[in-house]
Amino acid sequence: MRSVSSAERSRLLGALGIEGPEGLARALEGVGYLASPRVALGAFLALSLERPLLLEGAPGVGKTELAYALAAVLGSELVRLQCYEGIDVHQAVYDWDWGRQILHLRTLEALARGAGRAVEEVEAELFSDRFLVERAVLRALRGREAAHPPVLLVDEVDRADEAFEAYLLEVLSTWTVTIPEVGPQVAAVVPVVVLTSNRTRELHEALTRRCLYLWVDPPGPAREAEIVRRRVPEASERLARQLAHIVAELRRVGLFKPPGISETIDWAEALVRLGIDEVDEAVFVDTMGIVVKGRDDAERVASLGVGAILESRGPGDARNR
């Protein structure tokens, strides 16, 4: 297996000025991702130890964005595998281009009649790289550039079934994919692997033990306001802080689908587009659909009272003002 050695990985991080978690936090901030000390530490250890990083938490807390930010910091290709119910090896790892194979076979058959080629020789050509379709996992394992290992994002792994989870565990344990027609495909370079889960179901213990684990909480209002200001620089500091406070309160009141950071950013962009710099009750009601998704949640907000949500102070809000 052609793997990036620990020394080579350390040299890569050193060349990027990433000597520890603090260095990685600064590098992530440089590409627009504000990582908490815990997230920076977990990501640094995953990079240093060449271990998959499993991120769990509510939707919208920045799990997927961390993988994109790591790829930007490392100067690597980001390969994303979006999991869903029923996903299998041929959607996630590899497949064969059957249409091209059939056309190729017919051509070879016509040529073979005059050339006297053996059937086995003709069939062998059908299962070669020429007709192999690389899906996300195989593409990441075949990363060619040792200095910049690809980042494989396995997004929402909890949506896949247990059979696929077991297969994924085998791949992450051996860094090898076996294609029956051509044999094992061993990783050229150990990729950086980030798995995310919204915890819609429990993942198997074997998979979680293979990974470094990190639970990602939503940011506090002060950090979220800073994120909004970075992503929507046209938003005033006053508006960013107000939106961060309101969203923190919406998360606290037990909505079925609490808003994530992406909804806060969307809200800020919408209000800037409308020329609004302060959220009052009328603005909240008119634009609530950006952050409150679903009839039950909208009724919950109405029952609590829009004014109460705007005026309340959630836990820790005083510390972050």
Image (cartoon, rainbow, N blue to C red):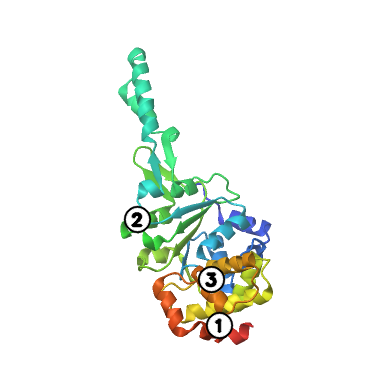
Please report whichever mark, 3 or 1, sits nearer to the chain's N-terminal start. Answer: 3
Q: Position of residue 24 (x, y in %)?
A: 63, 65
Q: Nearer the viewer, mark 2 or mark 1?
A: 1
Q: Position of residue 300 (x, y in %)?
A: 42, 79
Residue 117 in sight in this render: no
Q: Which mark is residue 310?
A: 1
Residue placed furthest toward the top: 114
Depicted 7 relative to depicted 270: above or below: above
Q: Secondary structure at mark 1?
A: helix
Residue 288 in sight in this render: yes
Q: Secondary structure at mark 2?
A: helix
Q: Which mark is residue 287?
A: 3
Type of the residue with mark 2: Phe
Q: Position of residue 316 (x, y in %)?
A: 57, 85
Crowding near pointer 3: few (<14 within 10 Å), some, many (20+)? some
Q: Nearer the viewer, mark 3 or mark 1?
A: 3
Q: Secondary structure at mark 3?
A: helix
**Mark pair 2, 1: CA separation:** 45 Å
Q: Quadrant of the C terminus?
A: bottom right
Type of the residue with mark 1: Leu
| Depth check, front residue: 42 or 56 | 56
Query: Which residue has dot 2 on it?
Result: 164
Crowding near pointer 1: few (<14 within 10 Å), some, many (20+)? some
For image coordinates 46% across by 84% down, the residue present is: 304
**Mark pair 2, 3: CA separation:** 40 Å
Q: Nearer the viewer, mark 2 or mark 3?
A: 3
Count all numbered tags in the image, as a single digit. Answer: 3
For image coordinates 42% across by 75% down, the residue present is: 297
Specify the quadrant of the image occupied by residue 314.
bottom right
